[in-house]
Amino acid sequence: MLRSSTAISRRLLLASGLTTTLGPLAARADSPAALQFPRDLGSHPDFAIEWWYVTGRALSGQREFGFQLTFFRSRVAATQGMTSAFAARQLIFAHAAVTDVAGKKFWHDQRIAREGFEVARMSLSDTGIRLRDWSLQHVGTEYRLHAASGDFELDLSLRESQAVLLQGAGGRSRKGPREQQFSLYYSLPQLEVKGTLGLAKERLAVQGAAWLDHEWSDALLDPAAVGWDWIGINLEGGAALTAFQLRDKAGQAIWDGGSFRHPNMGARPYAFSHGEVRFKPLRRWTSPLTRASYPVEWMVQTPADFYTVKAIIDHQELDSRASTGAVYWEGLSEVLDSNGRLVGRGYLEMTGYAHPLRL
């Protein structure tokens, strides 16, 4: 068990061979090709699906907020041979949300367009995404984020403070029992946030910490999977925790995984093996809009520790049926270690509770 918010369990240290370098852990990488940066920061239009996912916690004085901006790309197989500039070869979606903790309010919005005509575009060489007036741009060591709706506006810079984190085996993250069920996946945890948050007539200077995921795949979900539960948590002391499970319609885990990285571990974290992660629901909340019942408090068992993950507020459900077609829960959460101490904050995502997820 962890005995302090910045410690690593003895079991995890021994398994990873960590001193000040990765040691034998590096030999576990078995992806078909190593990820290349900055190229793999950009889009991969030959893959079926892809997303860039930014979540974070921001403070303005004593006020606490959560924020999320996600860009999705979906390759339309049937139109790839068309030569017309109007052919919808790639569809681009975006979701944004803000959580006001003290006010117990949650706002979200969405966008959709086909790529092209300067309405929606994605760079192949680096992170550079624009969908109408929403954007995510990588400039130097910063990501610049903008999204605005009638209820909120985000203008943030996210400065890199750590090396890229390669999920799974060197960036190849298994998502099911079959070898071909994997994604290429990296994260940037512990991003330092500065900027402004607009709410109605307020414009607040904020600072905090964020997490960025970039993932692309051709075969992400097993046919029996209806959804997943996922956490990405910035832990105190600079550590980062990822854990996930994919569920069948009975709520049983088909696959699980994740990672833990201490600041000294470099690009490759300790990758959790299948069977090492367990999600146990502790408390549920029923959406008044969709009647979906979400576990908003979990016990999550990992090789690093047993964590309690609690939603900061219950109502953080996104209804994106006007864009991706999904209804899911995604929100700011706090994390306690096995001794009951608050050790981090981050985001919990739950899909497939309103209806089975289809990608």
Image (cartoon, rainbow, N blue to C red):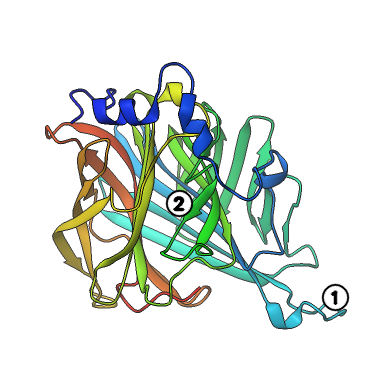
Q: Which element carries disc 1, helix, strand or loop?
A: loop
Q: Considering depth in this image, is 147 or 251 the residue closer to the camera?
A: 251
* Residue at 50% from the left image edge and 64% from the top image edge: 181
Q: Considering depth in this image, is 275 or 90 the residue closer to the camera?
A: 275
* Residue 308 placement: quadrant: top left
Q: Considering depth in this image, is 144 or 201 the residue closer to the camera?
A: 144
Disc 2 versus disc 1: nearer the observer: 1
- The amino acid type, in three-letter code, at marker 2 is Gln
- The amino acid type, in three-letter code, at marker 1 is Ala
Left or right of 301? Residue 325 is right
Q: Considering depth in this image, is 168 or 293 the residue closer to the camera?
A: 168
Percent coordinates x, y for residue 45 in the rendering: 71, 62
* Residue 93 placement: quadrant: bottom right
> Which residue reaches farthest right?
83
Percent coordinates x, y for residue 124 in the rendering: 75, 52
* Residue at 47% from the left image edge and 28% from the top image edge: 24
* Residue at 71% from the left image edge and 64% from the top image edge: 46
Left or right of 261? Residue 253 is left
Residue 220 visible from this viewpoint: yes
Residue 231 visible from this viewpoint: no
Which mark is drawn over residue 180?
Answer: none
Whether residues under marks 2 and 1 lie with C-beta atoms below 8 angstroms apart, the answer is: no
User: Would you call the spot at circle 2 few (<14 residues within 10 Å), some (14-19), or many (20 or more)?
Assistant: many
Percent coordinates x, y for residue 32 in the rendering: 63, 50
Which mark is drawn over residue 68?
Answer: 2
Q: Nearer the N terminus, badge 2 or badge 1?
A: 2
Which residue is identified by label 1? Answer: 85
Left or right of 176? Residue 7 is left
